[in-house]
Image (cartoon, coloured by chain):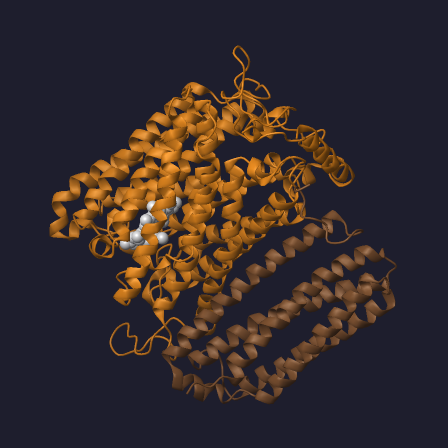
Amino acid sequence: MIEAHAAAVSGGAAEHAHDEDHIHPPPATWFTKYVWTYDHKTIGKQYLFTAMFFGLIGGLLAMLIRWQLAYPGQPVPWLGSIAKAMFFFDDNGAILPEGYNQMVTMHGTIMIFFVVIPIIVGAMGNFLIPLHVGARDVAFPFLNALSYWLYLPASVIIFASFFVDKGAAAAGWTSYPPLSAVAEMAPGSGLGQTFWLLSVFLLGFSSIVGGLNFLTTIITMRAPGLTMWRLPLVTWAQFVTSIFQTLATPVLASAVCLMLVDKLTGSSLFLPAGLHLTGDKAVGNSGGGSALMWQHIFWFYSHPAVYILVLPGMGVASDLLATFARKPIFGYKVMVFSMSGIIGLGFIVWGHHMFVSGMNPMVGTSFMMATMLIALPSGVKVFNWLATLWGGNIRFTTPMLCALSFVAMFIIGGLSGLFMAATPVDIFIHDTYYVVAHFHYVVFGGTLFAMFGGIYFWFPKMFGRMCNETLAKLHWAVTFITFNAVFFPMHILGEGGHMRRIADPTNYDFLLPLQPMNVFISISAFVLGAGQFIFLGNFFYSMFFGPKADPNPWQSNTLEWTTPSPIPYYNYEKIPTVYRGPYEYSTTVAEGQADWLAQSTPGADPAEHH
Amino acid sequence: MENVAALPHPGVSLQHARAKFGMWLFLGSEVMFFAGFIGAYIVLRSANPGLFEREFAQLSRPLAAINTMFLIASSLTMALAVYSSQHGQREKVGNFLMATIMLACGFMVIKTIEYTTKFSHGIFPSTSVPFAIYYTLTGFHALHVFAGILALLVLWGRAQAPASATAMAGACELVGLYWHLVDLIWIFLFPLLYLLKFP
Ligand code: HEM
Ligand SMILES: [Cu+2]
């Protein structure tokens, strides 16, 4: 059996020798090395740095939002003077309700579209996929560069929208019409919203191009011996995410195009007849449109998009947990099946965002059932992670702490998701801070923690140096504690009836008793925000001055750890041959030896001995 | 070896097999893009049945029928171009590509006539929801036709210069796939916009 395998492997290698083993000359100029580059690692870093810049902006917006909620109507200290140029402020330097709406909208848009998706897919996916499949680059390097160069103008446009006439979009990251579609309804619903739409369209294009590139890479470029069932779960997660990206993002693009038609031609695809703004002046030219239609099309994309947001995090967490528990991941294939289950179901649950939109209760019930089903594969994954830890030889490095936080926070976020999935419950908590708590638990507590873990973990591969472990642990601790201090109380606010997207909670008598909680949350949020500078400082200091990294500082066994740190531009001197799965820790080795086997170490595959 | 999608037939390069795979994925995303529009069409039409009937009665069926012929014919010439390119008949490739381009341009000319007559009657997207969705569907489809014409022109240019026959065949097949999809989308739009009547 081993002979047969080896023969197959060398056959594969011969076929490859032709196309893949050839090393292209390195990029010759500064421009082709750092700007218009085809190298997937550099493109990954371009995404990472751009997204970090937007993370700062999105974070500052969050600080402004929290200031307003804790101290409504009070002038914003020092940030105020910068922000005043961009938003609606009163003369004393306090945030006006219009300005508040713009901040909330831009915070959500920037964090989802310009920070999290670019980091998990653009940065992590680009950096890791070719390495994990044992290739020199992605299938279409040109398209890869193109996808970054579509993302960049999109981010320039969204940034520019702060400064256009009447300011940035103000209808929420979900841009529901008619608020978003009628210029007179909100200051940002004019040019600001048009910029928003253009920017999201470009970004969608970039996502689609990226997704099909990754799918082609994973399916057609795997090194000899690397079957699909030997791929690390990070790459499986990117594979599944890419299916979402390729097939769901175009639907967002069509929604955006329809709204652009409304905005640019004055049509009323999303505006019903008889829509009146003030007095008897009717809004929209003709009526006959459907505002709810936007919600359907938008959520048809954006529910799958929340899994675009979390699946790569799940993949990263799986790899980190296995590495630092020194155990094979528990239920590897089941992990893959559950991710596939999540995408299958992910396409048919969008209506759970619309329970209170007046939909037929029968339809609501179907969406409720489908949504609850998603908790099954999600739960399976959680139990597999716990079982991976069970009896492991756990090393509490920072990447591991981040991965553990991912699991814990994802459990809380998943559970609150279940509550909201139940229609009768959601009618009560929809559009309250409960929803805000839920999605921050899954996106920030889940995905971003996994990404912090991933960055600490692959930092040595990216930059050839190690991060400072003490600072990293400090950053983790501050983030973990203040994150929970910020977002856990929001569940309580939500149950108390605190609506989302209100500029001044003190306007409502029934919310006054909850105001001290808002103050507590805001103070925690300021610490959380400040804590991220530990990360940035550590990141940039270590990039230049950190201790030089070994090729494999974590004794991990996937392919990228067999290359030097940092990875040379051609990745692998010789395309590796793979002999086993990605999680051969502890179980396979004799006493006194290293407790792991690299995927490319020749020999029999222990998984095939049963 | 299961590492590479089995090569379709010998002589076709790995990179071409990949490009084809990527092209199919792209076509999948295009289908979803138009599915969003067509979904919107269905929602709006079922909400305003009488209105759609009345407004779409003003569309010109003969012009659309001619356009349908143009596109179907262009799919044929495109397929012949691909076939010739795979058999190394460069001259024929160029001619069939040119025929495809001419038919596509014919489509665009008629589309322009349709649009300008509508405009001259004061019918714009803002006139009514049926026309808004009509302009959206046909407009984005026309953009795809336009992109196709550009791609075909580049290909035609390559067919004039003595390039390697297999490289030509690869590119030709990719553009062909795209072109057939653009055609296919129109085959859906034609009945949806011009023919369908609900009882
Ligand atoms: C166990 C799995 C999950 C379930 C059952 C679930 C359920 C729900 C439901 C029912 C809502 C709508 C609540 C409302 O507006 O009243 C919702 C909102 C949301 N969920 Fe989840 N969810 C799950 C996982 C996730 C994950 C993994 C993410 C992202 C990583 C996520 C992100 C969001 C976001 C961003 C919103 C709010 C959108 C908005 O209105 O702005 N969810 N979720
Ligand atoms: Cu959802």
Q: Colour of chain B?
A: brown
Q: Does residue A315 appear left or right of residue A277 in this picture? A: right
Quarter of the figure with the C terminus of chain A: top right
Residue nearer the viewer, A118 or A155: A118
Image location of residue B66, percent across then percent down:
65, 85
Give the percent coordinates (x, y) of residue B146: 65, 70
Residue B134 visible here = yes
Q: Report whether A6 appears left or right of A496.
A: right
Q: Give the vertical position of A51 relative to B18 (above or below).
A: above
Residue at (53%, 43%) from the top-left corner? A122
From what the image shows, is residue A210 above or below residue A348?
A: above
In this view, the residue in front, A474 or A495, is A495
Q: Colour of chain A?
A: orange
Q: Which of the two residues, B78 or B142, is positioned nearer the viewer here?
A: B78
Toward the viewer: A406 or A259? A406
Q: Quadrant of the N terminus of chain A?
A: top right
